[in-house]
Image (tube, rainbow, N blue to C red):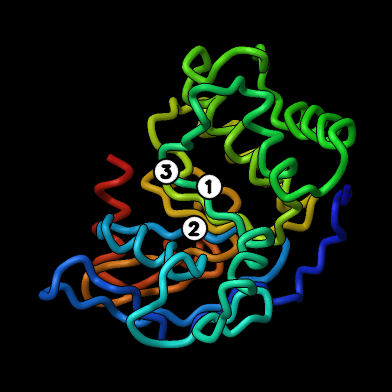
Amino acid sequence: MTENKPVQSNKILVEARGLVPHAETSDMILPPLDCQIPAGSITCLIGPFGIAKEAYLRALACIEVPAAGELHLLGNACTYLSPEQWRELRQHAVYILRDAPLLSSYNAFLNVMLPALYHHLADHAQVEEKARRLIQETGIQCDVSVLPAYLDEYQRRCLAITRGLMLDPDVLFIDDTFRQLEHEECQLMGNYLTHLVRDHGLAVVTSTFDLTLARKQADLIIFLTRKHIRCYDSWQAMLDSDDEEVHNFLSNAMN
């Protein structure tokens, strides 16, 4: 099975031009998004408009066809994908749901192995070896022979990400990475995601209410409000912004 990929920080994996997701209600107007996301980078979608963060994340991941605009994901024009191309894309652009739903009837270790076994990416022994290595990289200490119900939220979240990594993706889309995690766990998760980006050459794109990752490791911050979108290439650039909504959001988030 594929080992760590070389980092190609200049290779654009995700490109959006005037991308507008479908709104949940007819009276909701979402602004267009323009961005480029390279390999070996962390992108955080933040802001007070919670519904929009998930909608834009799903659109960027090509989970749903956008209402308007263009999306190129891993070199594919997503508007014109055939069902076969879409299935192939899903192995290289992995979307991890907010609730990290590991299958309750299988133990944690088998949960991690399932995607690689399903897609016949290697024989069972190779899949098992890779699963053990990736679990070790998370740094979590738990008994992976137990059912997910016996693990804590942080352990389940790490294993859900590990399960996605079994497909050797180029980009990980993670919905609400830090949901229900304690402060120390947020720090650990941020370090783990940074490891995946810097050492594996992945792009990580995540929506989040917690600003830990955006503040310390983000290469692109996409700030979403009901009226507009602002993109910043660093936390400092966001702090230096003269946008009143940005300052109000940061003031409320820090209090």
Instruction: Give the labeled residue for mark 1.
Output: 213
Label 1 sits on a secondary structure element that is: helix
Q: Quadrant of residue 93?
A: bottom right
Between the residue at mark 3 and the residue at mark 2, the CA separation in whole angstroms equals: 15 Å
Q: Amino acid at mark 1?
A: Leu
Number of the front mark, 3 or 1: 3
Q: Amino acid at mark 3?
A: Arg
**Mark 1 neighbour density, 10 Å: few (under 14) some (14–19) many (20 or more):** many
Between the residue at mark 2 and the residue at mark 1, the CA separation in whole angstroms equals: 8 Å
Between the residue at mark 3 and the residue at mark 1, the CA separation in whole angstroms equals: 16 Å
Instruction: Give the labeled residue for mark 3.
Output: 98
- Is residue 195 among the parts visible in the rendering? no
Q: Amino acid at mark 2?
A: Cys
Check whether the beta carbons of the residues at disc 2 and disc 1 lie within 8 A of each other. Answer: yes
Label 2 sits on a secondary structure element that is: strand
Q: Residue at x 29, y 61 (%)?
A: 247
Instruction: Give the labeled residue for mark 2.
Output: 44
Which numbered disc flags the more N-terminal residue, 3 or 1?
A: 3
Give the x, y percent position of residue 255.
27, 39
Label 3 sits on a secondary structure element that is: loop
